[in-house]
């Protein structure tokens, strides 16, 4: 079958997944979106579309994903996962799922594609053993830095994402960081990152009872505009931390709403250890979103400011209770 379009997540993993699908299926049209838009059926998706790294839509031609919560949502809709076109597998990245699927079909991929997928694995699952390993500027991390640079409007960013898809489709990833347009964005992000670190120094806190400072709290909900900050940079300030919980304001139609977004990520201090922590399970238990064991996100809707304040306290209390209970061999 011929596919007309690839619909993919607008992050590094989604871009690599789209690059693989474009090469494997000969599709040159790409649309970028987030999981919320697909879950709300806010964009049209048909049987001629390939969907990557996003929830399963009402209809599609092929679906590739690796989020356990998305698979559970499929089952709750009464759909047999075995009947769905494409592939689901709990892998470090969606790119790995696509890569394995194409390999099983006998579709020829260049030898360097494996290293690109390995970069997606590390970045999407935050699979690092130390701060030093995380900060090492590998080709994948440099390209991911270029994605995070605050350059241009929505149209320009979309055009850049599309350019990256086809560059990753046709070239080894180690060639990209030196290319015009990518190198300048990397330098732009380096300057932005330095400012973010200074901002974080005055913005992070810890919950009562967290004497060991395991869980950094980054509450940005009081800001009139959502500050532009990368939560994992908190590990440069508190390298002893085991995780970061971030609370962000929500904006709709340019106005601040009463709800808030939540994200949880695990530190590289837990990588390779038996620890029992699972960010995705916490978010799914709160029934606000989904994610991986190492990182998850969701949204809490509130009807008023007072309700938002109560919900923030409740959500943080549940996160902390589950976090403490998630030691090896102990059910939360």
Image (cartoon, rainbow, N blue to C red):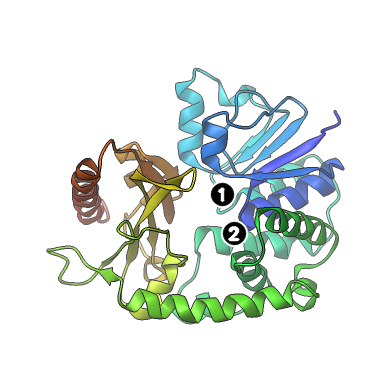
- Which label number is shown at residue 136? none
Left or right: residue 127 versus residue 11 is left
Disc 2 on helix, strand or loop?
helix
Can residue 130 be spotted in the picture? no
Q: CA distance from mark 2 to mark 1?
A: 8 Å
Residue at 27% across / 55% down in the picture? 328
Give the image location of residue 191, x and y in percent. 56, 81
Q: Quadrant of the C terminus?
A: top left
Q: Which residue is mark 1?
A: 91
Give the image location of residue 231, x and y in percent. 42, 66
Instruction: Judge by depth and name the residue closer to the eye, 232 or 321.
Output: 232
**Mark 2–mark 1 CB contact (< 8 Å):** yes
Residue at 35% across / 80% down in the picture? 237
> Is disc 2 surrounded by few (<14), some (14 to 19) or many (20+) residues within 10 Å?
some
Q: Quadrant of the N terminus?
A: top right
Residue at 60% across / 23% down in the picture? 58
Give the image location of residue 104, x and y in percent. 76, 42
Disc 1 on helix, strand or loop?
loop
Q: Earlier in the sequence, mark 2 or mark 1?
A: 1
Q: Which residue is mark 2?
A: 121
């Amino acid at each position: 079958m011929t596919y007309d379009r690839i619909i993919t997540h607008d992050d590094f993993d989604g871009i690599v997944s789209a690059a693989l699908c474009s090469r494997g299926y000969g599709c040159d049209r790409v649309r970028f979106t987030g999981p919320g838009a697909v879950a709300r059926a806010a964009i049209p998706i048909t049987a001629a579309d390939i969907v990557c790294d996003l929830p399963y839509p009402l209809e599609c031609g092929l679906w590739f994903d690796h989020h356990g919560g998305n698979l559970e949502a499929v089952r709750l809709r009464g759909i047999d996962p075995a009947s769905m076109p494409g592939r689901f597998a709990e892998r470090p990245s969606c790119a790995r799922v696509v890569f394995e699927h194409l390999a099983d079909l006998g579709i020829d991929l260049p030898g360097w594609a494996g290293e690109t997928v390995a970069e997606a694995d590390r970045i999407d699952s935050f699979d690092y053993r130390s701060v030093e390993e995380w900060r090492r500027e590998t080709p994948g991390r440099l390209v991911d830095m270029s994605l995070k640079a605050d350059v241009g409007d929505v149209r320009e960013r979309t055009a850049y994402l599309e350019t990256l898809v086809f560059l990753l489709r046709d070239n080894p990833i180690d060639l990209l960081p030196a290319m015009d347009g990518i190198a300048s964005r990397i330098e732009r992000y380096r300057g932005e990152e330095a400012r973010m670190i200074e901002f974080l120094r005055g913005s992070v806190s810890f919950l009562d009872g967290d004497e060991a400072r395991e869980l950094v709290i980054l509450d940005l909900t009081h800001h009139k505009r959502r500050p532009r900050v990368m939560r994992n940079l908190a590990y440069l300030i508190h390298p002893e931390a085991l995780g970061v919980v971030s609370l962000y304001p929500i904006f709709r139609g340019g106005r601040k709403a009463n709800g808030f977004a939540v994200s949880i990520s695990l530190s590289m201090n837990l990588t390779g250890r038996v620890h029992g922590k699972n960010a995705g399970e916490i978010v799914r238990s709160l029934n606000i979103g989904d994610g991986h064991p190492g990182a998850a996100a969701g949204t809490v809707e509130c009807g008023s400011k007072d309700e938002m304040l109560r919900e923030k306290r409740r959500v943080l209390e549940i996160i902390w209770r589950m976090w403490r209970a998630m030691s090896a061999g102990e059910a939360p």
